[in-house]
Amino acid sequence: MKRSKALKLSLMGASALTLVACDNSQEVGVFETIDQCVDKAGFTRDVCEANQKFAQSEHIKVSPKYTSLSDCETDFGSEKCEAAPQRTTSGGSVFMPMMMGYMMGNMLSGGSRVATQPLYRSRDDSRNFRTGDNQKVSGKTGVTRVAGHTTRAPSTKTRTIRRGGFGSAARASAGKFRSFRGFGG
């Protein structure tokens, strides 16, 4: 087979895979409050409360963690961070962004495989919600379609992020953190 023909076939195959990947969207509910969940999507208050409570419990595990409040606020904005219940192995404080909303599967469309999870808003993209793994979800609340990869359960964060300063990229600290007693860790 000629190279040009093989290249064309390869490109056609890659294009088809790209189209399938783009079409792998899921319907989810994105909410800031329980009332939004009930009013905008018609879920029962019990369903909305249970999903919000689960997202809140996941928030402690999956939110990005920082060794300083100023590093957290650099990424999420002034007064948008809080102390995490964990401590560094040397006993220092750990900070995380505040939960700004939550994403839940749309049970109205039949069995959902969407991971209920907390959502955040970054300082440089404050219009959109993001997952704990920094995946863009949506800029609006209510029931919406999102890319399938954003609906996976976010990873548990066991390392803190330390800013390098002077425009350096953030990097994960080699030091892990430990949980306070009484917080399940």
Image (cartoon, rainbow, N blue to C red):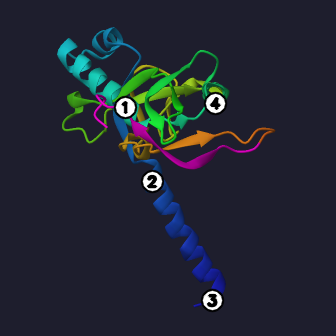
Please tell me which of labels 1 and 4 falls first in the chain: 4
Task: Return the residue found at the far front.
Answer: 90
Mark 1 vs mark 4, foreground winner is 1
- Given residues 36 and 11, the one toward you in this image is 36
Is 175 within the magenta?
A: yes
Please tell me which of labels 1 and 3 falls first in the chain: 3
Neighbours of disc 1 within 10 Å: few (<14), some (14-19), many (20+): few
Q: Which residue is mark 3?
A: 2
Q: Which residue is mark 1?
A: 180
- Evaluate whether residue 31 shows in this view: yes
- Given residues 77 and 172, the one toward you in this image is 172
Left or right of 163? Residue 19 is: left
Which residues fall within the magenta stretch?
168-185
Q: Tags 2 and 1 in contact by the CB under 8 Å rule?
A: no
Left or right of 9? Residue 48 is: left
**Secondary structure beneath label 3:** loop
Residue appearing at x 54%, y 75% in the figure: 9
Distance between the Cα atoms at labels 1 and 3?
64 Å
Residue appearing at x 61%, y 77% in the figure: 7
Label disc, if present, on residue 132 of the rendered structure: none
Task: Return the residue found at the far bottom.
Answer: 1
Q: Which residue is mark 4?
A: 75
Q: Position of residue 10 (x, y in %)?
A: 55, 74
Distance between the Cα atoms at labels 2 and 1?
41 Å
- Look at label 4 and name its amino acid: Asp
